[in-house]
Amino acid sequence: MALVADTHWFDPRAPRPDEGRAADAADLASRLPHVVAQAREVAGSVVHGVHGRRRAGAGETFWQYRPFESGESAHRVDWRRSARGDQLFVREREWEAAQNYFVWVDCSASMAFKSSLASDYKIDRAAVLGLAAAEVLVQGGERVGALGLTPALCARNIIDRLAAVISNQPPDSGVNDIAPSTALPPRAKLILVSDFLCDVEELATRLREYSQAGARGALLMILDPAEESFPFAGETLFRDTDGGAPFHAGEAQSLRAAYAERLAEHKDSLRIAARDAGFLFLLHHTDRPAAEAALALLMGLGEGMGAR
Amino acid sequence: MGFAFVAPLALLGLLALPLIYWLLRVTPPAPREIIFPPVRLLRDLEPQEQTPVKTPWPLLLLRLAISALASLAMAGPVWNPAGPAAAGGPLLVALDDGWAAAPGWDRRVAAAAGLIEGAERAGTAVGLMLASEGAAAPELTDGARAAEHLRAARPKPWLPDRGLAGAQVKAFARAHKTARIVWIADGLEQSGAAEFAAALREAGASGAGVEVLKEEAAPLALEGAANDAAALEVSVLRAGPRGDGVVEALDDKARLVARAPFQFAGSDKTKARFDLPIELRNEVSFLRVVGENSAGAVALLDSRGRVRRVAIVGGAAGDVAQPLLSAAYYLEKALAPFTLLLKSNPGDADPVLAALADRPNVLVLADEKVAPGEAFEALSNFVEQGGVLLRFAGPRLANDPDDLTPVRLRRNGRVLGGAMSWDTPKRLADFDGASPFFGLAVPADVAVNRQILAEPDPGLSAKTWARLADGTPLATFERRGKGVVVLFHVGADANWSNLPISGLFVEMLKRICALSNEGAADHSASAPDVDRATLPPLRTLDGFGVLGAPPATAKAIGADFPGRGDAEHPPGFYGVPGAETAVQTLAPDDSVRAFDFSKFELSPRPLEREAAVRDLRPLLLTLIFVGLLIDWLVLLWLSGRLRLAAGVTGLAVVCVLGMSINAHPARADAQKTASSAHDRDAALKTRLAYVISGDARIDETSRSGLETLSRTLDQRTSFSPGDPVGVDVARDELAFYPMLYWPINALAPQPSEKTVARVAAYMKQGGTVVFDTRDALTARANATPTPEAQWLRELAKGLDIPELEIVPRDHVITKTFYLLDGFVGRYANGDTWVEELPPERANDAPRPVRATDNVSAIVITSNDLASAWAQDKSGRPLYPLTPGGARQREMSLRGGVNLVMYTLTGNYKSDQVHVRDLLQRLGQ
């Protein structure tokens, strides 16, 4: 018999007496200092791991010497290095052109969820990851903004500014579980953090839009371990966070296999949609350390897209 | 027999069951609600298993059962209810409370309590009438008052007259026509049973309901205990069919001396006979029938009942020609019924020395002169050591008096009456109060023809026990050392007077012989003006046949008190210690007869059936509780909040709780490894230990008591013990503890044989066990032992316990650290017993301390030591002391320190007290 977790649902909207289901952003605001601190910590631990763009380009920092290729203009030869031998070398600097990154953190109701198996709310984790990525990127010399809310910025206190913007979204300003359609600068990079428990078709359409606008990026799917393993048993009434019709299960444990299948399908279709739009698809569970996901995200952004 | 309901209307609640059934059927248990974001993934899934909409039938059944039980419980079911009250009339319980009711007293009281409870339940008034309070009209009260009255009632050591009570019953029945009268009878015919039964019959005729309850077993009684020269005999009487039994003889400290069986062979009277050496028989202070706890089944033996060893010297040698006229023959005839006569061998060189060699209590010299020499020395010594020397005058003594006489004698006697004298033979004067003969009737025909006269020295009258009518002494005495010399101024044959052939002579000899064991308690000498006319009560029997302090209502008896005890003179010992006079429960020729109830158309029911009224409500409530628990668990399980395994565990817990609260959970083997760690700790540090008694309160007291003692030892001595531990004698290794404190918990089960063997081995290896029966308040010397004492006796059967004695003042245990008189605890009156020391050798110089080579393996106290030691964390004592005071607490701690130091140092201190002498010797 599989382990039936003693799950409990912790209502993130509890401090707020009004029953608006989309009003969890304010709750995020109350936990903001914690989220910000966590984001700095994650960013701090990740920054040591990822330095620069790791490819040659216009920049100040030395990148590598490479053999001179015929046809190149002679002024590129680094004579100090070449004088040491017979071969001519060209000194390359690291590519340092700033790029525009946009972070989007899903603040919909489904994100304000936590099971007893996890340590964090999904929305907290999403915010931590989004903000940490922004910090690391800004330190790497990029410009980062909140998708649809701010232009791309290059500020030292990027975490605070983005956190303020994200948490101050008016509750009824169409907080959606799909990233907003918005005008993007060319070659923008998008970091979309959400649980993506949305309509895949809609999401695919939106991603195609981005892709056509020349944007690339990554989808980071945040899932609670309970959502992954479905640790429920017995007669259960499942209520939707978005106010949809509840689902009544006579024997919850009998649904586990079917649910796992459904979830795998959903993830597959997400992955395909992302791939088609040239986006990276990453999965993170809230019972794992945040730094792990942040590192994967940044490495993915650096390598997966740098080749193009 | 059977059921009854206190509130049958509550059973209407059962009518609601169908409604409950319907409600339960339509209301399934609510599902568990969970907020779950990915519901949309589930949404089009078809659940494979659907919960039944209706409550499952076992649950339904369970809940219906719970509801039914609830209404049953509210109706107040009672099993075996007491019989219904007769038409709502008041109830009168007449309870016989003489000694004959004592054997089944608990059952009688239980039956009466059951009746009173039943009446209270029925709401009728109750009256309780004790036979001993028959003079007062019974008072009708509510059940609580009557029950209180009943609890205060105790059987009396005499038989109250029921004739008075009968009159009260008649009056009661006249006043209350519908009354129900229950007589809990003792079944004896004596003391007015017939009158009472007649009153009951009359009451029944006037409309009252009359019932009689009676104990099945007929009472037994002892009477006429006689300790004569051959054996100690006592008559056992029975009032009705009764099997054979055993009579036990006990000494004045209630220690068992001997047991003798008796058989009723058809008759209602038989004898129990103790064939014992005379010394043992004289130790016997009272006899009782084993298992028959009533005053009637106890026979007391006072100092008059002891058999003396008597040797007679003289009077025979010269009169062999006419042995039937010799003084020795008269003396033998007079003494033989109540003493053990030691036969003298005519061939002995010195008859006095030969007689003394037989260790007599009384030596009779009939007209025998004792010349200075070896025999004189031996006789003087004999008297100094407590012997009674009884001398009779005669021609030889009159010619040449010696020094072993109470008074100086004149040569030649005087002749009263006869051919050569004008005087007539003299009569005896009445005995005065200071004389041991006081109370004996002086027959008018006793006359004295000839006597030896005493020199009229000062103090002569104080030395005189008996006089002639003219005031000249007939019997004189003198105390010498512990003994006494008595001289009859007449001969022991019929030549000088006819006293020796009167009944008075035998009585006088009896009283003189009774003097022989008084020893140091010679009241006549120390308090010459003590009034022999009245004897104050010393120790009296209660209804259960237990000797104790006399009640406040007991009055002194006259010296001529006739036999049977009554309300004012309860049976028991009267007088002063050492010279008690016994007042028996039954007079010598009393008999006990069963009362014939059928003559009065009464049919007694046996008592047993009245027992076991049982309220079933607690049982039902327990069942309901268990049912609700099961229901809760099932609901949890149905909604998936409970894993099956946890459910089974929960059920098991419920079962364990519900069924066997007192089951002793066996400790798992896993404990074994833990106990070795426990042992290692114990081995590394010397510490005090107590035996876990099974009662949490006692154990906590022991622990905190020993903790305080350990602290005290640490502060005051060089021994700093570790924290005290509780040990389980059945499992833990005992070898590490020098001393085990064992508070007796009478409710605990007896340890197994194996455990007892472990304790015995521990004691043999040099450990000391301090048993604390904690019952000094309730224990009495010769009463039935308290449950704790009984428990300890049971335990001691498996232990090899040596002779014990109360701690003597020179025992080393009183000197190991502090100089103590005794070991007090929470109580100060209990004795402390240790192994007996070897007796002091007579020729040794008196030593200040005595000790053996090893430590007493057992110390028994009843003073509840640990409670006196116990303190809480802030040093405040936990229990009040009796009689109390800071000094007692301090002394209890000192006693504890001494105990521990004794177990640790043994006889070391007995050497220490000589250290001053040793140093002096070294200096020389």
Image (cartoon, grey):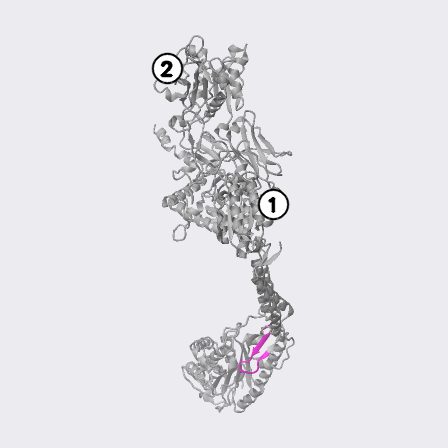
To the question of a shared chain for discs 1 and 2, the answer is yes
Residue A32 seen by the camera? yes
Q: Nearer the viewer, mark 1 or mark 2?
A: 1
Q: Which residue is mark 2?
A: B455
Task: Please state, as top left, top right, bottom left or bottom right, where the C terminus of chain B lies in the image.
Answer: top left
Mark 1 in CB contact with mark 2 (< 8 angstroms): no
Q: Position of residue B99 (x, y in %)?
A: 53, 40
- For this rendering, which residue is in front, B410 or A105? B410
- Say few, some or many: other residues with alpha carbon within 10 Å of mark 2 (under 14 / 14 to 19 / 20 or more): few
State whether residue B117 is above or below residue A94. above
Q: Amino acid at mark 1?
A: Leu
| Mark 2 belongs to chain | B
Q: Which residue is mark 1?
A: B602
State whether residue B9 is above or below residue B405. below
- Magenta-colored span: A232-247
> In which image quadrant can residue B55 be found?
bottom right
Q: With A156 as the anchor, is A228 left or right in this view?
A: right
Q: Secondary structure at mark 1?
A: loop
Task: Please state, as top left, top right, bottom left or bottom right, where the N terminus of chain B lies in the image.
Answer: bottom right
Q: Magenta region, mostly helix, strand or loop? A: loop
Q: Residue at x 56, y 25 (%)?
A: B230
Q: CA distance from mark 1 to mark 2?
A: 75 Å
Q: Amino acid at mark 2?
A: Glu
Q: Secondary structure at mark 2?
A: loop
Q: Position of residue B809 (x, y in %)?
A: 41, 34
Q: Position of residue A277 (x, y in %)?
A: 56, 87
Number of marks: 2
The residue lying furthest to the top in this view is: B420
Please say whether residue A235 is one of the residues in the magenta stretch.
Answer: yes
- For this rendering, which residue is in front, B537 or B561? B561
- For this rendering, which residue is in front, B421 or B453? B421
Residue B359 seen by the camera? no
